C-alpha cells in the first residue's frame, strides 16, 4: 500500500513540474534582447538636445531592463558595435555619426525634414528613420479650415529646392476642398514682391521652418504686410506665436519624448525594425489670442482643434498625411 502511495506521489510531482516549467521558461528574457543597446548621441552645444537625451535615457530605463542605455558625444565616435540602435538628437549628431561610417540602425530627431532627407540620401531606408517635431503642412491646413471656415485659398512661400513638394501639397489641399497657391522665393531680395503676389490670391499664409524665408530679419516685415492686408500667418511652430502669427500646431518636448520612447519600444518588439519616418502624432495647438481677436477670428478650446485634426489624419492614412 505504501509503495502504491509513494508511486502516486512521484506521478503527481512530475505532473506539477511539467505544468509549472513552461511558465518559468517564458519569464526569462529573450536571448536576442540581452545584448541590445541604445546609444544616445546629443549635441553638447544645444541645451535642448542634452536635456532631451537625459530624459530619454531615464524614461528608457524605466521602460525595460532588457537593453543597455548610454549617452555619448561626438568625441566618443566612432561606435564600433554596429548592433546598437543610435538615437541622434539634432542635425550635428546625425552628421557626425554618418561621417563616422556607422553601419547600424539610426533613429534621428530634432531635425528638419529637408536636412534629414539630404543627409540620409545615400543610406538604405531600412537603416535610418526620423521623428519630426515640426508641424506638417496637412495639419496646418486642417487648423486653417477649423479656424477660418469660410476661407478656401491658402498660400505658401517656397525656395527652389522645395518645389518638388508642390504637387503633393496641392493634392492634399484639393482633398480638403482648399486651393493652395504658392510663390517660389529664389533670393531674399524678392521676398516682399513674392509675398504681395501671394497675399492677393489667398486668405492666409502657412509658414514653414525654412530659415531662408522665415528668420529674424524677415518675420516682422512678413507679419506686418499680412496684417495690413487683413490676412494672417499660421506659424510653423510656437516660436511664431509671440511675434504675431495667429496660430500653429506644435509638438512639445514632452510629447516628442513620449513618441521617441514608443518608437524605440516598437524597434525592439518588432525584431530591430525601425518605425517609418514620420511627424509626431502627438501635438497641441497654440494661439495668439490678441491677433485672432483683431481679425475677428473665433477661437475655440484647444481640444476642439486637436480632436478634429487627429480624426481627419487617421482618415487620410499615414502615407498621405505628410510631405
Image (cartoon, rainbow, N blue to C red):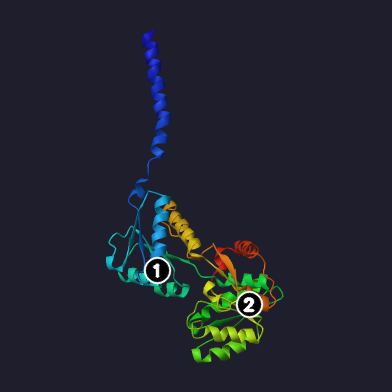
Q: Which mark is residue 47?
A: 1
Residue 273 sits in quarter: bottom left
Q: Position of residue 165 (x, y in %)?
A: 53, 77
Q: Is residue 318 above or below residue 158?
A: above
Q: Which mark is residue 79?
A: none
Left or right: 53 as drawn, with respect to 77? right
Callout 2: SS:
helix
Task: Name the residue tied to disc 2.
Answer: 291
Q: Position of residue 63 (x, y in %)?
A: 43, 51
List the single residue furthest toward the right.
Answer: 150
Q: CA distance from mark 2 to mark 1?
A: 31 Å
List the single residue furthest toward the top.
Answer: 1
Q: Nearer the viewer, residue 30 or 307?
A: 307
Left or right: 184 as drawn, with respect to 295? left
User: Does the rendering let one see residue 111?
Assistant: yes
Q: Which residue is at 57% across, 67% downward? A: 321
Left or right: 184 as drawn, with respect to 51? right
Q: Nearer the viewer, residue 163 or 225?
A: 225
Q: Split into 4 quadrants, where in the image is the N terminus?
A: top left
Left or right: 90 as drawn, with respect to 249? left
In this figure, what is the number of numbered marks?
2
Q: Are marks 2 and 1 in contact (CB under 8 Å)?
A: no
List the single residue furthest toward the front.
Answer: 290
Q: Which residue is at 37% across, 9% downward? A: 2
Q: Position of residue 80 (x, y in %)?
A: 27, 61
Mark toward the start of the polypeptide (2 vs 1) = 1
Residue 72 sits in quarter: bottom left
Q: Is residue 309 above or below residue 154?
A: above
Q: Position of residue 75 (x, y in %)?
A: 28, 68
Q: Residues within 10 Å of mark 1 (few under 14, many from 20)?
A: few
Q: Which residue is at 29% across, 63% downward? A: 79
Callout 1: SS:
helix
Amino acid at each position: 500500500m505504501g509503495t502504491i502511495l509513494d508511486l502516486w506521489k512521484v506521478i503527481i510531482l512530475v505532473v506539477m513540474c511539467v505544468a509549472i516549467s513552461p511558465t518559468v521558461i517564458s519569464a526569462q528574457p529573450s536571448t536576442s534582447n540581452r545584448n541590445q543597446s541604445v546609444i544616445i548621441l546629443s549635441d553638447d552645444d544645444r541645451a535642448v538636445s542634452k536635456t532631451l537625451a537625459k530624459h530619454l535615457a531615464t524614461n528608457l530605463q524605466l521602460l525595460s531592463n532588457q537593453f543597455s542605455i548610454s549617452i555619448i558625444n561626438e568625441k566618443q565616435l566612432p561606435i564600433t558595435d554596429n548592433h546598437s540602435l543610435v538615437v541622434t538628437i539634432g542635425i550635428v549628431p546625425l552628421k557626425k555619426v554618418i561621417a563616422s561610417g556607422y553601419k547600424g540602425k539610426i533613429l534621428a530627431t530634432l531635425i528638419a525634414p529637408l536636412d534629414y532627407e539630404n543627409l540620409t540620401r545615400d543610406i538604405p531606408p531600412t537603416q535610418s528613420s526620423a521623428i519630426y517635431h515640426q508641424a506638417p503642412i496637412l495639419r496646418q491646413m486642417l487648423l486653417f479650415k477649423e479656424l477660418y471656415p469660410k476661407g478656401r485659398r491658402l498660400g505658401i512661400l517656397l525656395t527652389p529646392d522645395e518645389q518638388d513638394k508642390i504637387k503633393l501639397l496641392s493634392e492634399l489641399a484639393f482633398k480638403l476642398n482648399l486651393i493652395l497657391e504658392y510663390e517660389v522665393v529664389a533670393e531674399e531680395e524678392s521676398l516682399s514682391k513674392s509675398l504681395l503676389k501671394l497675399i492677393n490670391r489667398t486668405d492666409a499664409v502657412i509658414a514653414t521652418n525654412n530659415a531662408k524665408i522665415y528668420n529674424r530679419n524677415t518675420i516682422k516685415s512678413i507679419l506686418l504686410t499680412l496684417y495690413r492686408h487683413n490676412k494672417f500667418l499660421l506659424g510653423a511652430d510656437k516660436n511664431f506665436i509671440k511675434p504675431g502669427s495667429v496660430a500653429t500646431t506644435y509638438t512639445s518636448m514632452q510629447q516628442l519624448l513620449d513618441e521617441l520612447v514608443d518608437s524605440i519600444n516598437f524597434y525592439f518588439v518588432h525584431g530591430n525594425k525601425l518605425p517609418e519616418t514620420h511627424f509626431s502624432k502627438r501635438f497641441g495647438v497654440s494661439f495668439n489670442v490678441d491677433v485672432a481677436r483683431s481679425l475677428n477670428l473665433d477661437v475655440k478650446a484647444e481640444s476642439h482643434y486637436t480632436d478634429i485634426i487627429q480624426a481627419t489624419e487617421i482618415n487620410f492614412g499615414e502615407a498621405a498625411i505628410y510631405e
